Image (cartoon, grey):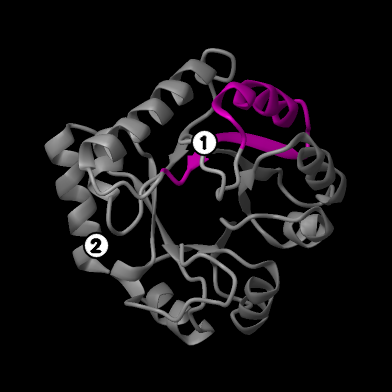
């Protein structure tokens, strides 16, 4: 983990930006692997699948971990997500906003929420269109059981760094434009193991890293290895 943190520090220093938060993507990793990384000081972990995450949480109960849902959330999993996660980074439709607010319990702190934006308009990706982000942000901000934290994106895996960086730059511009109406927004989640330096250069405040922390993993059937 030290090497990854150093990598983030170096990228931030070169770009004259603050070092972003590290979210360890623990999808398809064992509870033991999560525990080992937690012992090294990592607290925030990202999961794609609700049921897989709930199983790990049950094994790791008692550890002071912060759980982020970073995979597509189906409406029928909204109750479990609202009750068992600290963050949901993939809100892309108003129906989901209403469901998460309804199921978040009053005895819990507000659920931290990011609007997922399909910044490259990929047919295979979830996320709202950039022009829909303002409406979703307003809907989230209106819910007392939710806390609007910012935006999340997974740009297209362009082989050309300039094109990938341009997508990150568009996300940063959108983030800054929404902060006029929502000045408490503080999180721009973008960048992964293979492009976190580009994301940091364009203003990422959180990067989602899996492979560089855990190594290669077997992909779950029918799901992208993100």
Residue 18 visible in the shown view = no
Question: Residue visible at 30% across and 31% down?
Answer: 166
- Residue 80's spot in the image, x, y percent? 78, 62
Image quadrant where residue 99 sits? top right
User: The N terminus appears in which quarter of the rendering?
Assistant: bottom left
Looking at the image, the residue that sits furthest to the front is 123
Q: Image check: 154 left or right of 143? A: left
Residue 92 visible in the shown view = yes
User: Label 2, label 1: how many angstroms apart (C-alpha)?
Assistant: 30 Å
Mark 2 surroundings within 10 Å by alpha-carbon count, few (fewer than 14), some (14 through 19), many (20 or more): some
Picture layout, residue 169 above or below residue 105: above
Image quadrant where residue 78 sits? bottom right
- Residue 8's spot in the image, x, y percent? 23, 51
Image quadrant where residue 117 sits? top right
Of circles 2 and 1, the one toward us is: 1
Residue assigned mark 1: 121
Residue assigned mark 2: 4
């Amino acid at each position: 983990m030290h090497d990854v943190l150093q990598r983030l520090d170096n990228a931030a220093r070169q770009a004259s930006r603050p070092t972003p938060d590290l979210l360890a993507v623990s999808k398809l990793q064992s509870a033991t692997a999560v525990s080992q990384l937690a012992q090294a000081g990592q607290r925030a972990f990202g999961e794609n699948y609700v049921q897989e995450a709930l199983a790990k949480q049950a094994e790791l109960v008692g550890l002071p971990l912060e759980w982020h849902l970073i995979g597509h959330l189906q409406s029928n999993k909204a109750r479990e997500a609202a009750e068992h996660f600290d963050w949901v980074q993939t809100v892309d439709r108003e129906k989901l906003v209403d469901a998460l607010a309804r199921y978040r319990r009053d005895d819990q702190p507000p659920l931290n929420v990011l609007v997922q934006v399909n910044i490259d308009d990929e047919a295979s990706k979830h996320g709202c269109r950039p022009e829909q982000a303002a409406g979703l942000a307003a809907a989230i901000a209106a819910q007392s059981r939710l806390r609007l934290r910012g935006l999340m994106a997974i740009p297209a895996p362009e082989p050309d760094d300039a094109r990938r960086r341009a997508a990150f730059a568009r996300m940063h511009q959108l983030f800054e434009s929404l902060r006029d109406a929502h000045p408490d927004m503080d999180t721009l989640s973008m960048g992964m193991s293979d492009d976190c330096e580009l994301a940091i250069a364009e203003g990422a405040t959180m990067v989602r890293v899996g492979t560089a922390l855990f190594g290669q993993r077997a992909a779950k059937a029918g799901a992208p290895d993100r």
